[in-house]
Image: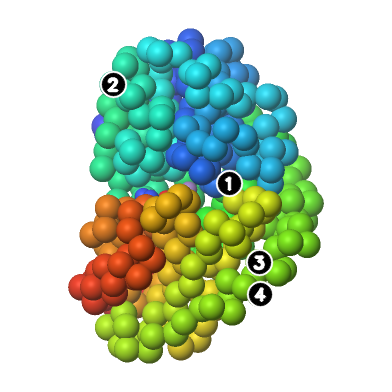
Amino acid sequence: MSNSASAPTATQQAATLLTAAGDVTLVAHVQPDADALGSALALGLALRQRGATVRVSFGAPAQTPESLVGLDVAGLIVPPDQVPARPEVLVALDTASRSRLGCLADRIETADAVLVIDHHATNDRFGTHHLVDVRAEATAVLVLRLIDALEVPLNEPMARCLYAGLVTDTSCFRRADPSTHAVAGRLLAAGVDPEALTRALLDTHPFGWLPMLATVLGRAQLEPTSAQGLGLVHTTVRLADAAGLRGEEIESVVDLVRTTSEAEVAAVLKEIGPDRWSVSLRAKNRIDVSAAAAELGGGGHRLAAGLTADGTADAILDALRTALHNAPRLQAPAL
Ligand code: AMP
Ligand code: MN
Ligand code: MN
């Protein structure tokens, strides 16, 4: 809904910036998920179609997650050392703060312009231009608006990248209003095969996933009095549990743990080094876990957040119990 008499919208301002750019570097957050990488690739394809030189990158890991490789049909992804030291325009996607760019965070200072496209409640507006809408279910929705503003016709490779972000960030459309389904409808009309895409993204694991789940779920613990008496369920994934498995297998654990009916909050502590952990937090609808994560140096959304912490698993759990005790209550079911 544009109104030519009013100030340009953030989408229009972003489109103006990108229309003038001859060289654009698009970066996703570290350990990119489908929303971060799919959004970067879709926008990269659109800008390339307009004649710009584009590249897509992320700070870690060294390899593109296997389940996302099929999104990069044009080979836009380059390793971080091939990102220019002084990018003309840097676009950070699905990234709430500079530290989430890992080794590419220094380009925020050296780039001529930094466009931040994101939907995290904890976004701290680290760019020069911002297309941030916390009501958007996925960064992919904001990128579709931008592609429309750039007047690039949507094609199947772009739509596939955006659908990947939308389907994962809405937990397979569990959280979706009519406008979300309207966006999905446009993406399907552009030719996306939802079954093939979601099978590769969400429903494919090696056999070793099953014994890993048996171990990790077998040590889950339920604390009915934690999280303000609403219940906390937690488990750990140790490096030894995850040996030989991909990130996709490890990230899947929280989706099973969070189904526990007796717990409002689920936490999965994933060991990433000696006494170093990446923590995934999920809430059903009554506690703002992004506040608890932010308290501990992380961030995210009200119902899905995360953090990275040093210490023993027991010490991190203690800090988490306190942060959840102090976290704001949500009044109404939240998106
Ligand atoms: P995850 O549990 O990794 O799927 O992450 C859930 C949400 O929390 C995502 O929106 C992430 O952007 C955010 N998040 C995860 N880890 C961190 C972190 N270390 N710092 C800030 N935000 C995080
Ligand atoms: Mn993400
Ligand atoms: Mn997202």
Q: Judge left or right: residue 169 versus residue 332.
A: right
- Say which residue label 2 marks: 109
State how far apart marks 4 and 1 are (Cα): 26 Å
Element marked by disc 2: helix
- Compare marks 3 and 1 and give the one earlier in the sequence: 1
The residue positioned 36% from the left and 63% from the top of the image is 312
Of badges 3 and 2, nearer the viewer stands 3
Q: Mark 2 vs mark 1: which is more N-terminal?
A: 1
Residue at label 1? 34
**Residue at mark 3:** 212
Q: Amino acid at mark 1?
A: Ala
What SS does tag 4 mark? helix
For residue 161, which quarter of the picture? top right
Quarter of the view holding residue 100 = top left
Q: Nearer the viewer, residue 59 or 302?
A: 59
**Mark sitting on residue 314:** none
Which residue is disc 4 drawn over? Answer: 214
Q: Residue at x 60, y 19 (%)?
A: 48
Tag 2: residue type?
A: Glu
Q: In 3D space, how far apart are the residues under numbered discs 3 and 1 (Cα atoms)?
A: 23 Å
Label 3: element kind: helix
Asked whether residue 149 is in view, the answer is no
- On the image, the x and y values in percent for residue 301 come to 37, 58
Screen quadrant of the C terminus: bottom left
- Label 3, residues with CA under 10 Å away: few <14, some 14-19, many ≥20: many
Mark 4, mark 1: which one is toward the viewer? Answer: 4
Q: Position of residue 186 (x, y in %)?
A: 64, 47
Left or right: 243 in relation to 28: right
Which residue is most to the left? 326
Query: Is the residue marked 1 within 8 Å of ligand 2, measured from its CB?
Result: no
Q: Residue at x 73, y 58 (%)?
A: 205
